[in-house]
Image (spheres, rainbow, N blue to C red):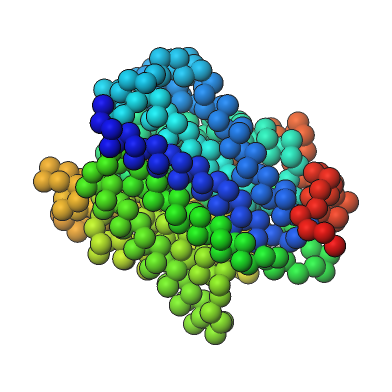
Amino acid sequence: MNNGDTAWLLVSAALVMLMLPGLALFYGGLVRRKNVLSTIMHSFFGLALVTIVWVVVGFGIAFGPSVGGWGLFGDPTSLLFLNGVGMEPSETYADTIPFVLFAGFQLMFAAITPALITGAFAERKKFAAFVTFTIVWSIFIYSPLAHMVWSTDGWLAGLGALDFAGGTVVHISSGVSALVVALMIGSRRKNGEKMDPHDVPMTVLGAGLLWFGWFGFNAGSAVAANGAAAMAFVVTTIAASAGMISWVGVQYARTKKVSVVGAAAGAVAGLVAITPAAGFVGVAGALVIGFVVGGLSYLVAGLLRERLHIDDALDVFAVHGAGGMWGAIATGIFATTAVTGVDGAKGLLEGDPQQLVNQIIAVAFTVVFAAVGTAIIMTIVNTVFGARVPEEHEEIGLDLAVHGEAAYQA
């Protein structure tokens, strides 16, 4: 066991946990004031829900022995209630830190992923439907994807697909699922109300906390305090900065306004795109990834909202879906042995087109798996509970109608 690695992973797990209240504030500021508490509750309560799911069966599905040898999901009974996950290192996944710390670090990834989806159905989904959806989606979508990508005997891992910290597992899966949920649940009722963010400073604070927590998200995924963690740390902030500048630049070219919300969204888009690539690309790759994703996400958000009239309330697909796809594909372009090592992975620019092919296969599979799985889950949830709140609840706001509380005094 290595004390430095253990200390870094303890800090990293805490940083990723901080991303959940950061996400709550980021999303909470973007909605109308009558729905801010309900939006915050999705992220906050989701952490508790997924923690229990992860401890009971999620970790086993993600990192247990592959069932049937197909590499699609692990045996949920193998690590039931974290049985056998103790204070000693694991030769397979965490050979210098306690295995229970590895489980705790991965728990935070599992918790934030379904929370990202909640931005698509903000202001209109029943709480019971949210709870059920989060539990079922975590078990049947997130954990199997984590197994396929990060387990030593996972199918996509065996294929050679690269995902350092969650481009496919976290961002593409949540972004695509968000788009499916938005399509199935329908648009918010406006009744002449403006849909502008009610508290932009809250959103910027949330974005800042997300950026801060992302250092644990990406650099922590090295599972050690080493050079890979250091490079992941640096390229993370480079891509976030480039994404912010790109989003604001493209938005200014179209609207002649320098948007503060756009700056926050662009930074998050940059963070999303660098996530799968953080341990495989250098500074130049991070710059390109960030500059491309800012404008890309802004244009996709506009396409969905203005042309297709899809009410993905908080642009989850544009930022996480489109951003995650670009980041995963870009990993296959910009991966470099200068970062991965002499015998490490390399991308198209260093003469390995197969890596790009592997990335495209992983992206395509994740899109289909998440879309079909989410559609099935939403259909079941809607049949059992009815996914959408009554019209009168949506009219007065979910804070009062569902939670019996108001965020602000009149």
Residue 24 visible, this angle: yes
Residue 61 lies, in percent from the top left, at: 46, 24
Using residue 101 as the reference point, say whether residue 352 is left or right of it. left
Q: For this rendering, which residue is in front, 344 or 50?
A: 50
Residue 30 lies, in percent from the top left, at: 65, 61
Residue drawn at x 85%, y 62% is 410
Residue 272 lies, in percent from the top left, at: 43, 54
Q: Is residue 284 above or below residue 185?
A: below
Q: For this rendering, which residue is in front, 357 or 344?
A: 344
Q: For residue 35, which quarter of the picture?
A: bottom right
Using residue 299 as the reference point, say whether residue 133 is left or right of it. right
Residue 74 visible, this angle: no
Q: Is residue 151 above or below residue 318?
A: above
Say how many tags the image has: 0
Residue drawn at x 61%, y 44% is 43
Residue drawn at x 26%, y 26% is 1
Q: Residue furthest bottom?
A: 256
Q: Residue furthest left?
A: 342
Q: For residue 293, which quarter of the picture?
A: bottom left
Q: Is residue 108 above or below residue 94?
A: below
Residue drawn at x 61%, y 66% is 201
Q: For this rendering, which residue is in front, 245 or 327?
A: 245
Residue 17 lies, in percent from the top left, at: 50, 42
Q: For this rendering, which residue is in front, 122 or 370?
A: 122
Q: Is residue 254 above or below residue 209?
A: below
